[in-house]
């Protein structure tokens, strides 16, 4: 996995937490508290949590049994990173860019997350995948 400096933004002020599939409810609660603490208004937290839940669920069901969540503020954005250690995923094209088929019952997570976030980057390699999403935070 290449490092384009995104991890350099994760400072000591980042909220971080490891998690597994059973921890997803606690991860959502933790992420909501971090988002509010960092200035996200209540009316934006629902979409943020929906996007986060899709990515976090993918990490622990398709990546590896353990993953790591980081939440931090970067200027006017709230940034969230979800990293797993599962290797071998070779996506075709940009993950989440193409909508799922009309009658799909799965495979919509990254598409939903991309639609709900301001920006989403997916980096994958032999040592795992990291999905980084940005959400605007209104202030004042």
Image: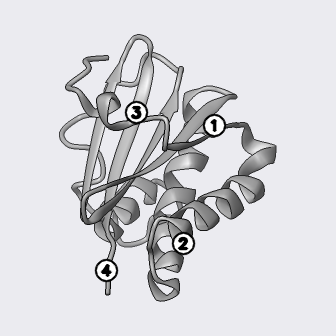
Disc nearest the viewer among 2 and 3: 2
Residue 127 circle label: none
Q: Which residue is mark 4?
A: 138
**Left or right of 61, for residue 14:** left
C-beta proximity under 8 Å, tags 4 and 3: no
Q: Which residue is more in the foreground, 51 or 27? A: 27
The residue at 18%/39% (across/down) is 93
Alpha carbons under labels 4 and 2: distance apart: 11 Å
- Which circle's residue, 1 or 3, is located before the other in the chain? 1
The residue at 63%/37% (across/down) is 60
Quarter holding the N terminus is top left
> At numbered mark 2, what does the secondary structure look like: helix, strand or loop?
helix
Residue 130 circle label: 3
- Which circle's residue, 4 or 2, is located before the other in the chain? 2
Disc nearest the viewer among 4 and 3: 4
Q: Which residue is mark 2?
A: 36
Q: Is any atom of residue 49 visible in this view?
A: no
Q: Which residue is mark 1?
A: 60
Local packing at callout 3 (Cα closer than 10 Å; few below 14, some 14-19, many 20+) is many
Residue 105 locus on image (x, y percent): 53, 64
**Left or right of 90, for residue 29:** right
């Amino acid at each position: 996995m290449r490092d384009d400096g995104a991890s350099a933004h994760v400072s000591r002020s980042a909220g971080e937490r490891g998690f597994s599939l059973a921890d997803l409810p606690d991860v959502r609660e933790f992420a909501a508290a971090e988002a509010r603490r960092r200035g996200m208004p209540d009316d934006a937290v629902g979409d943020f949590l929906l996007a986060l839940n899709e990515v976090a669920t993918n990490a622990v069901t398709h990546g590896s049994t353990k993953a790591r969540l980081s939440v931090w503020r970067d200027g006017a954005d709230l940034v969230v990173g979800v990293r797993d250690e599962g290797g071998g995923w070779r996506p075709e094209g940009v993950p989440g860019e193409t909508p799922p088929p009309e009658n799909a019952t799965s495979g919509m997570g990254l598409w939903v997350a991309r639609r709900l976030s301001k920006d989403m980057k997916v980096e994958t390699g032999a040592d795992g995948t990291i999905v980084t999403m940005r959400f605007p935070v209104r202030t004042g």
